[in-house]
Amino acid sequence: MPETARAKITALGAYVPPRVLTNQDLEKIVETTDQWILERTGIRERHVADKGIAASDLAVEAVKNLVKSHPMDLQEIDLIVVGTVTPDMMYPSTACLVQHKLGIHHTWGFDVSAGCSGFLYALNVGTEFIESGRYRKVLVIGSDVNTSMVNYEDRAVCIIFGDGAGAVLLEPANEGDDNVIVDHVAQVEGAGGAFLYMPGGGSLNPASPETVAKKMHYIHQDGQQVFKYAVKKMAEMTERVLERNQLTGADVDCFIAHQANKRIITATADRLKMPMEKVIINIDRYGNTTAGTIPLAMQSAVEEGKLKPGDTVLLAAVGAGFTSGATLLRWGF
Ligand code: COA
């Protein structure tokens, strides 16, 4: 058996499609106002993929941006893990499509379905593979085109989502390097499935004229239930991972949460007594990009000088399922 190792994030890339949909644009589509959206969610605008652009396309662009900032031979990648709930199609997996589009040979990969926790869960999976000692270069990607599942007549849902993707490279840390993925906690509670789901197109309700007529191919959401659960669970998961590592919010240099609603993020930060300058918020520019939010927020944090080598970073997400999780790491580059 190979020796076990700690996993480390060594590179980052993110991507959003160029087309921007502002709150003012949405005012022309549904009965809403810029002020309502901004006050209730913190979102000003979001990027939307054009027709024909799918999750694998955004993922590929994110990986290309990763390579631009961290030149490397992609042929060395031995595993691709993609967090997504908007795969290009039911199968093949998005990971297979990304492998093919990037022309990476001698690798394997698969998708992780965890709603808005998709990137965090993919990161957990990638970390375990590095820690097994068998894998040395793992691409972890979060990519979603959730606007393709949005009913633009449902004002409580269509204002939230944007499209985007991000990718990190995981490698084994060198001996003595403590800028590693330190720990993670995660939990699923399937009873919450009824509050955020897409009922059509799966094996229960295969696509048919009837499922389309009933709008079953769209996101169905009970926003208040999701909101309440997210506030409670994000606090619980972050506290759990901090406590078991004998840390408090005061020890965290950078808090990067899934960007679903600004009020969910600030409620968690308040509970952890974290000043807002340590909290990364870019939901105003991107909306909720599902599995894309955390790597996109990492990218914003790096660009804004809020994420530096050696920083203690707390990641957290809650998503459809319900899924939730929190990850503690020290930034390495
Ligand atoms: N513009 C104007 N009014 C709107 C609106 C919009 N876009 N969407 C809903 N409303 C109205 C509702 O119809 C309701 O009107 P009523 O009081 O006359 O019935 C009122 O605003 C309040 O609706 P409510 O659902 O209580 O609003 P809210 O404060 O809970 O905000 C969300 C709605 C969706 C923004 C909020 O619940 C949320 O962010 N939930 C979490 C969603 C999420 O994170 N999903 C992704 C999962 S990771």
Image (cartoon, rainbow, N blue to C red):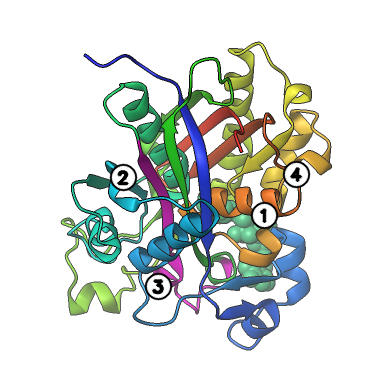
Q: Please state the horizontal and vertical placement of residue 78, each as a whole percent of the image.
A: 27, 41
Residues at discs 1 and 4 in contact (Cβ within 8 Å):
no
- The local secondary structure at tag 1 comes to helix
Which comes before the other along the chain, label 4 or label 3? 3
- Where on the image, by quarter, is ligand 1? bottom right
Residue tagged 4? 306
Label count reads 4
Separation of residues labelled 1 and 2 (CA atoms): 25 Å
Separation of residues labelled 3 and 2 (CA atoms): 30 Å
Separation of residues labelled 1 and 4 (CA atoms): 8 Å
Separation of residues labelled 4 and 3 (CA atoms): 32 Å
- The local secondary structure at tag 3 comes to helix
Which comes before the other along the chain, label 3 or label 2? 2
Residue tagged 2? 77
Kindly identify the amino acid type of the residue bearing the numbered disc 2: Ile
User: Is residue 21 part of the magenta span, yes or no?
Assistant: no
Kindly identify the amino acid type of the residue bearing the numbered disc 3: Ser
Q: Is residue 94 above or below residue 83?
A: below
Residue tagged 1? 300
Nearest-to-viewer mark from 2 and 4:
2
Nearest-to-viewer mark from 1 and 3:
1
Kindly identify the amino acid type of the residue bearing the numbered disc 4: Lys
Q: Which residues are magenta?
A: 137-156
User: Is residue 141 part of the magenta span, yes or no?
Assistant: yes
Front-most of 262 and 20?
A: 20
